[in-house]
Amino acid sequence: MDKDAFMKELEAHLQAKFSTDFEHASDYEKYGALSSLVMTKVQEEWVASRNKDRKIRNEYYFSAEFLVGRSLGNNLLNLGILDEVKEVLLSMGVDFEDLEDQEEDAALGNGGLGRLAACFIDSAASMGLPVQGYGVRYSQGIFKQKFVDGFQRELGDDWLRRGDFWSIRKDKYARPVRFRDEAVMAVPYDMPIVGFKNGVVNTLRLWQAEPIDSGFNFDLFNNFQYSDAIAGMNRARDITRVLYPNDIQRAGKVLRLKQQYFFTSASIQDLVIRYKKNFPEDPKFDHFSDMTAIQLNDTHPVIAIPELMRILIDEEGLSWDRAYEIAGQTFAFTNHTVLQEALEKWPLDIVDEVSPRCLTLMKEIDAKMVSELEVHHGIGEEDLGPYRIIHDGIVEMAYLAVWMSTSVNGVAQIHTSILKAETLAQWFKLFPKKFNNKTNGVTPRRWLMYANPDLAEFISRKLGSDDWHHDLTLLKGLERYMDDEETLEELNAIKYRRKQDLADYILRTEGIEVDPDSIFDIQIKRLHEYKRQLLNALHILYLYNQLKKNPGMDMVPRTFIFGAKAAPGYFQAKAIIKFINEIAHTVNADPDTRDKLRVVFLQNYRVSSAEKLFPAADVSEQISTAGKEASGTGCMKFMMNATPTLGTYDGANIEIFREAGEENNYRFGATVEELNSIADSYNPKEYYFKDREIKQVVDALLDDRNFHDNGTFMFLDIYNSLVKPQHGERGDQYYVLYDFRKYLEAQEKIDRDYRDRLGWARKCLANLANSGYFSSDRTIREYAHEIWKINPMEG
């Protein structure tokens, strides 16, 4: 990179964008100018990549979420100029981090599903594969989280309020989307997905809902009816305002399905128009499925299946049978859950309100399926119930996806096994070859090279090259240093620096001092009962009780760090957040315990904060109830940053234990088989009454003296869920009390092992050295070869 030329270009962008020079520009203006400059540098490669993929088979990744985080640093890294840009800025008296902090996290997702999608499109571009993303441009994200007296409060996440330097609006590709009673315009914003040092730039196209006309009624405004004058504009924009609108009431359900239909309809229209332009010689779409593969990332985009048929039949004049055949050859489906409540089942009246034509087609697909099952599989009418897509006034979106897809995959070995044996067992029995596993992965560029540059430099130095940047399995070569004390000490030193960085961040953002010499025990993920943040919290209470009885107790000081958002309508999850915050208030304020125990619940957990948390962890908390976590990707990011896992035999934990060895991690708790064997007999009250220490921590939920303000009414529900089940349900459905003592024993072993600093470093190095399997490059390679049948772009 020509540094002098770069400085001149930066000055030029400052003048063009903000009418200022470098000396007088604010940090935000410098950030904006740098971002604009980076965008100009990717344009040529972006256009070239688009031209390469026009006549070859492409894969299109349909996802309701793409949790991409910040773009500036990641794009500079993938362009191969991050370090040089940092040096140039430093020579101009500017710290790159000050500019980076001006960028808002793109509020385009929430949890693991969205971050997975972001890792996947990063890997696809870095491997030169023709993969494009389609999603929604949410203006407010899921929400910005704030704690008020320990309660979660949801605020709008207005990430676009100061502009967006990383998207280009493409009005010429806007598409109308028609619902039963209204129509809106889907306007695309394209984000470049920059491959790692390979000249490839793929596209993430995000749709924003706008009124078809201006949406502004001048007559009403002129008549002083100001709110009514913009009602049409607001109604259209509501569709893409918030990720996963609260669907407790019917209006929220309608809006949520409208959101799904909106982005899938716009995307399918886009693909059909693209195909017609690229292959004008094929007006009958005879080769559409040869050139087009669509991956449905969970059930949210499954309505794309009848929408493709609708367009082919109603707008392109194909027969029903031909449209059905094409759709059945185009889609593949990724399932992300074994929880029945997460498998979308839409009431027919809501589908009818959103798209009556799609509902008609769903019914016709169901009838066609019944006929084929009877004729080709010998399934009689009395046995068709478990397969029906339409039944009892609902449509089963997962069943529609399984029936109409060429491939159905789970996202970890145990998850796929459960899909085959339980969740979708009837379908696996019929179509065993359709089912396959694709264990998730994460991009090492964002989560190792960018988030932990010291560790990345350490790896290159020890391995003697940067070849691991392109093949993460080469990290296995680090195993030759397992008994090298100098290497182990160096690894400990890198971890300690990251812990100091995190401590500074926590003090700056939360106002809480934490000790980098303590064990950083971190659980960061979506708040859900099956993820068992409650188990973690009860263990903290246990430690607190022990310290109160014996302030001189021999224990390594421990800092417990949480990050999680609870869905706005999920009362129990919000109660758990309040409970943890109350524990934190009590523990951190108590002079008897605060030197040995600290609790921090970071507000508004997001990608940019995760980049500080993963490198600093000593313990990775992956404690979901066995059989409930499909995969998890946080566990992989911790592992990639040299952190042992404390986890159940669940999700990707199983494969982490396999790769790095159980001796280098901390497995605890019941297995799926064990829980299945006690499902009908388990009585949590037995554990509650027979174990005095368990009873003590559970009873704390009922004691107002433990908490500094109101909110204990919420804790009664937590207590009841554990030992006083309601409505005929078994108590403690996520086996918190059943696993508590085993969890405690594992935590005690961590306390003992951590004291041996070289021994602990060996565990950390073993995890780092064996994390190569969990690169999303490996996962995408499997998708590309086994499902999508695509090849890298040439040239």
Image: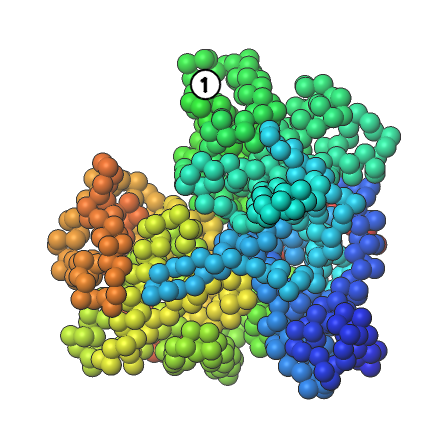
Q: Is residue 455 left or right of residue 583?
A: right
Q: Is residue 69 visible?
A: no
Residue 329 x, y percent position in the rendering: 67, 30
Picture quadrant where residue 691 is located: bottom left
**Residue in view at x 43 percent, y 63 percent:** 146
**Residue in view at x 42 percent, y 22 percent:** 392
**Residue in view at x 62 percent, y 44 percent:** 223
Query: Furthest-right residue in view?
Result: 281
Q: Residues within 10 Å of mark 1 (few under 14, many from 20)?
A: few
Picture quadrant where residue 745 is located: bottom left
Q: Is residue 109 visible?
A: yes
**Residue in view at x 59 percent, y 53 percent:** 139
In the image, residue 443 above or below residue 731: below
Q: Quadrant location of the N terminus?
A: bottom right
Q: Quadrant location of the C terminus?
A: bottom right
Residue 122 x, y percent position in the rendering: 65, 56
Give the amino acid type for the residue marked by disc 1 in the picture: Leu
Q: Is residue 683 left or right of residue 120?
A: left
Q: Is residue 135 left or right of residue 533?
A: right
Picture quadrant where residue 603 is located: bottom left
Secondary structure at badge 1 equals loop
Circle 1 is placed at which residue position? 384
Q: Is residue 353 left or right of residue 313?
A: left
Looking at the picture, the colour scheme in use is rainbow
